[in-house]
Amino acid sequence: MIRSLPPLALVVFLSACSLLHDELPNESPTLQISQSICQSPAMTHPDTIVNGSDAFCQVRRGGEIRFVVRAADEDDDPLIYRWNAFGAGSFRDSLARGENSWFAPESITDSSEEFIIQVVISDRDCSTISEPNDRQACIDVAGKIMETFRVEVIQRLPTYSVIADTTVFFREPFIRIDGFGNDPDGDPLEYRWQHTEGQAAGLSNITQEALRDDETFEQIGSRAIAVALYPSNYLLRANGEETLFPASYRINTSVNDGEKPVEREITVQIPAEPLPEGGMVQLTEPTTGLDFEIDIYEYPNSKGEFPLEATLFEAINFCGVQGKRLCSPSELQAACQGDQPLAYSSTDDPLAYAGLEHFGVRFCNSPKSAFAFLGGGDFTASLAPSGSFPNCGGTTGVFDLTGNIGEWTVRSNDSTGDLEIYFMASDVTIDGGCTFIGSAGTLPLAGGDIYDPAVLQQQRESLDVIILQTLEQGSIGFRCCR
């Protein structure tokens, strides 16, 4: 038979048990699970990593790492988890829990940066105690453990594929270069093209357009387009000054993922194809179907020589001495237009350079060319040596029919026997194309060969003074046909 204790003895026994429990030491929590899971891995490391091993999470900027930490407490005290990244990145959950995600910073200082993530597990929440002495007493008896995780945030550079150097012939209307970028971290890419300082004198502003995948329409690269203004080894003389337009240009291009650019420098060679020294080209006059030959350059028909300003009578005489004749308007127009037909004696369109201060020698020697620009409004100073504008030969190889100097032309009127006088009204001061032909009147013929110097002089002396002044005006040149 078990007898019960008297009431007073029971109180004493319970008090003793309580005192005995208070004197027992507090057991610290023990760690059971500690691992990190790379939700957004930057490299090929395992997704789940047990803390304490040699491996650690590597994630790209802004990537997520999920931490799983489990602890037990023999005293059955509730456990508090406090996470700390020391100001870097951000946590998904601010509450004290054993599972949490950390998001890496969107920007790092270099291509790689390491961070420490720390969790402290405690069996006392002393922060809730307001009285200082009691809070310190709580801290003194609290049991805690600390886990530290090492993580690395990777900023991988984009790859950039672009041609290192290229040659673009001056006859081409523009330089076109394609660059293709790829970012292993999936970051959006920004492309940039610009002239290298000191090498931009011969190029217009570079424009660019996005290159996109045909199916997804996502941008996969960038295309740079620049107008090549000057040919190689070209020396311009105007107003006593010499300006060399180089044949080699440097373009700097880069792709940037928002942190660090990958740069490339491209060398572009722009050679001008060798032009003939002179001579004639055989063509067909389209209205008659007759073949004819025409000088390649304006008289004296020699590359590098300035065209001659001449009166109509001088022009007839110079061609006659060579066994040639002045060209007809239809012959000049056929040589200017070619078989396309072109609006100008160039495959270029001057409207493409409307925003430029001058287009150099890209088009023809017309208003806003390099010669017109540096000539300062002086017609003679603005003339260019033959062959200075490599693109001004169209498809026929007859140069400077647009711009430079206007040219005398003649046509026989079969019904009256008169010689009709025209000139190509397109020069360094006047905008004009292949169809801009102006009339200068007629020269009545009394018979004989106009290319006979005596007949020519007789005709000159018989002219009215007003007509004579028109036919002896300056700033007009010529070329010969046969």
Image (cartoon, rainbow, N blue to C red):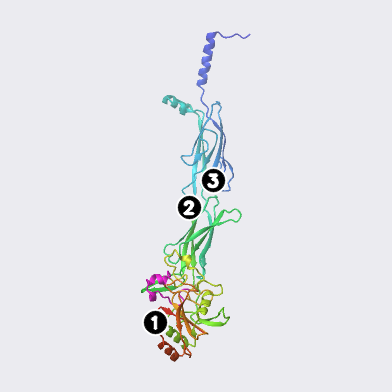
Secondary structure type for disc 3: strand
Q: Rate crowding at label 1 as few (under 14), some (14 to 19) or many (20 or more) other CA atoms within 10 Å.
A: few
What residue is shown with label 3?
Answer: 59
Q: Nearer the viewer, residue 277 or 7?
A: 277
Q: Rate crowding at label 2 as few (under 14), some (14 to 19) or many (20 or more) other CA atoms within 10 Å.
A: some
For the point 52% across and 79% down, the residue is 331
Does the magenta portion include 385?
Answer: yes
Check residue 255 in the rendering and tell me which mark sits there, or answer none.
none
Of label 1 and label 3, which has the lower sequence position?
3
Of label 3 and label 2, which has the lower sequence position?
3
What residue is shown with label 1?
Answer: 466
Relative to 9, say whether 20 is above or below.
below
Q: Nearer the viewer, mark 3 or mark 2?
A: 2
Relative to 441, say whether 208 is above or below.
above
| Cα–Cα span, label 1 and label 3 | 90 Å
Circles 3 and 2, Cβ within 8 Å, touching? The answer is no
Q: Which residue type does callout 3 highlight?
A: Val
| Cα–Cα span, label 2 and label 1 | 74 Å
Of label 2 and label 1, which has the lower sequence position?
2
Q: Position of residue 289 (x, y in %)?
A: 58, 80
Q: Quadrant of residue 426?
A: bottom left
Q: Position of residue 206 (x, y in %)?
A: 47, 61
What residue is shown with label 2?
Answer: 260
Secondary structure type for disc 1: helix
Q: Which residue type does callout 2 highlight?
A: Lys
Q: Nearer the viewer, residue 152 or 1?
A: 152
Q: Which residue type does callout 1 highlight?
A: Ile
Q: Which residues are magenta?
A: 367-389
